[in-house]
């Protein structure tokens, strides 16, 4: 049974991006601090075609989060800063010509666009008929492997609210943002039962894995 | 140098109590779930005069959090459900005649009341002249040991916002509350620099210890 697995970095006060996201500031004001644990790692540098980097307790967590993934779902704001109808096909994502996904990526949007095939096995598919359709297509594309759910908050929260997320890997950064995009906003709490699977103490971050079950009887 | 140490249980979405706190429901609706990891422990049962109980990875964290403490500060809502002027001296705290503090406890309130001496070394002092006065009195009473800061959220947030907290031990429960009392609400994020000291994976909870420094230059 294919799982939907959310992996996201969050501030200690519950935000996954700062306010005022823009092309210059895709994670919002202060949001880069959520990922500072990640930048020195060899895994991060490899994703960006660079040599070197650290291996620490986060490395095994990252490796595990990438294992068994056959497709990716993300929101349009994670794909790029363009809002409204696509003016043209010039925006090709934040990640250059060889994005670090190496799998089909399903981008939720209200505006249709032809699939965009990149190098290294990543093809962006633009899905306009909602989260359940995107999950069905991603699950099909994953061919029995799991589906990774990226951000942003809005996309993650829609899947959480619908009870479609099976596993959460929350990387809690030692940061207070105070405002921005909140994970779990609008998610009916009684519908989401979390079980802590494991916590990992790593330099500058704590990774907590939860399994999720929806309990409609409790709501 | 005496430290002010906050220890508090928080939901994954940042709440330290549920909504609608009352005498029947002192932690608010759903708030008991924040502490479910604690109830089976021998440390919890001992505090309440009971035998038995589990020893697990949380036990050492609790032990450490109690070590080196010479005084306690808490908000009035943590002391009890009475609001407004004290009608009489009949409310003596949630904890019975031998409260688990065994130290002077400074209760922040707008309404003065005589000190209340309990069994086992706990005396409740009611402080009406603000958080800095309470900290000064608690530090003095602690005689070189540290001061423990309990909840609720309002009290913790006032001390955090004033840059007076030196250490935070946040016990993150696998719970989404969705509403209630938020830790860090109103705390200016740029003033509070956290450094992750350690995370402990325990059954049903993750304990993360942070050191805090205020950075007035960054605000």
Image (spheres, coloured by chain):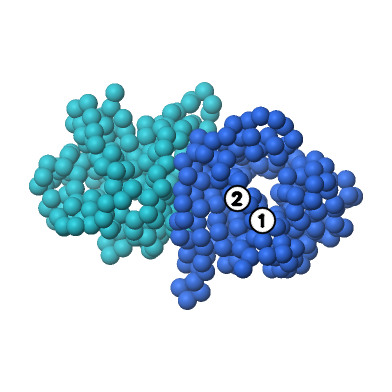
Chain colours: A cyan, B blue
Graded by Cα atoms within 10 Å as few (under 14), some (14 to 19) or many (20 or more), the crowding at tag 2 reads some
Is residue B141 at all visible to an observer of this figure?
yes
Image position of B30 with respect to A182: above or below:
above
Spot occupied by residue A24 in the image (x, y as percentages of width and height): 28, 65
Q: What's the mark number on residue B40?
A: none
Spot occupied by residue A75 in the image (x, y as percentages of width and height): 29, 45
- Residue plotted at (59% across, 45% down): B62
Residue B54: which quarter of the image? top right
Q: Which residue is mark 2?
A: B65
Question: Residues under labels 1 and 2: Cα distance?
Answer: 8 Å
Q: Which residue is mark 1?
A: B69
Q: Secondary structure at mark 2?
A: helix
Which chain letter goes with mark 2?
B
Residue A173: which quarter of the image? bottom left
Which residue occupies the foreground of this view, B155 or A25?
Answer: B155
Q: How many marks?
A: 2
Residue A60: which quarter of the image? top left
Which residue occupies the foreground of this view, B108 or B53?
Answer: B53
Spot occupied by residue B33 in the image (x, y as percentages of width and height): 58, 36
Is residue A126 at all visible to an observer of this figure?
no
Spot occupied by residue A63 in the image (x, y as percentages of width and height): 26, 42
Which chain letter goes with mark 1?
B
- Residue plotted at (43% across, 28% down): A213
Q: Is residue A206 left or right of residue B92?
A: left
């Amino acid at each position: 049974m294919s799982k939907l697995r959310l992996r996201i970095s969050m501030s200690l006060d519950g935000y996954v991006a700062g306010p005022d996201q823009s092309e210059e500031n895709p994670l919002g004001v202060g949001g880069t601090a959520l990922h500072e644990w990640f930048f020195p790692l060899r895994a991060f540098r490899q994703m960006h075609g660079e040599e070197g980097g650290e291996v620490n307790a986060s490395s095994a967590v990252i490796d595990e989060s990438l294992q068994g993934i056959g497709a990716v779902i993300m929101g349009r704001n994670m794909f790029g800063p363009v809002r409204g109808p696509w003016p043209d096909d010039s925006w090709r994502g934040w990640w250059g010509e060889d994005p670090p996904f190496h799998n089909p990526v399903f981008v939720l949007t209200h505006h249709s666009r032809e699939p965009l095939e990149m190098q290294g096995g990543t093809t962006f598919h633009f899905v306009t008929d909602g989260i359940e359709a995107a999950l069905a297509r991603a699950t099909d594309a994953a061919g029995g492997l799991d589906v990774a759910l990226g951000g942003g908050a809005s996309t993650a929260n829609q899947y959480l609210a619908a009870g479609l997320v099976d596993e959460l890997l929350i990387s809690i950064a030692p940061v207070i943002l105070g405002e921005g995009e909140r994970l779990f906003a609008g998610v009916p709490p009684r519908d989401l039962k979390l079980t802590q699977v494991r916590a990992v103490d790593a330099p500058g971050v704590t990774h907590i894995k939860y399994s999720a079950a929806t309990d409609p009887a409790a709501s």
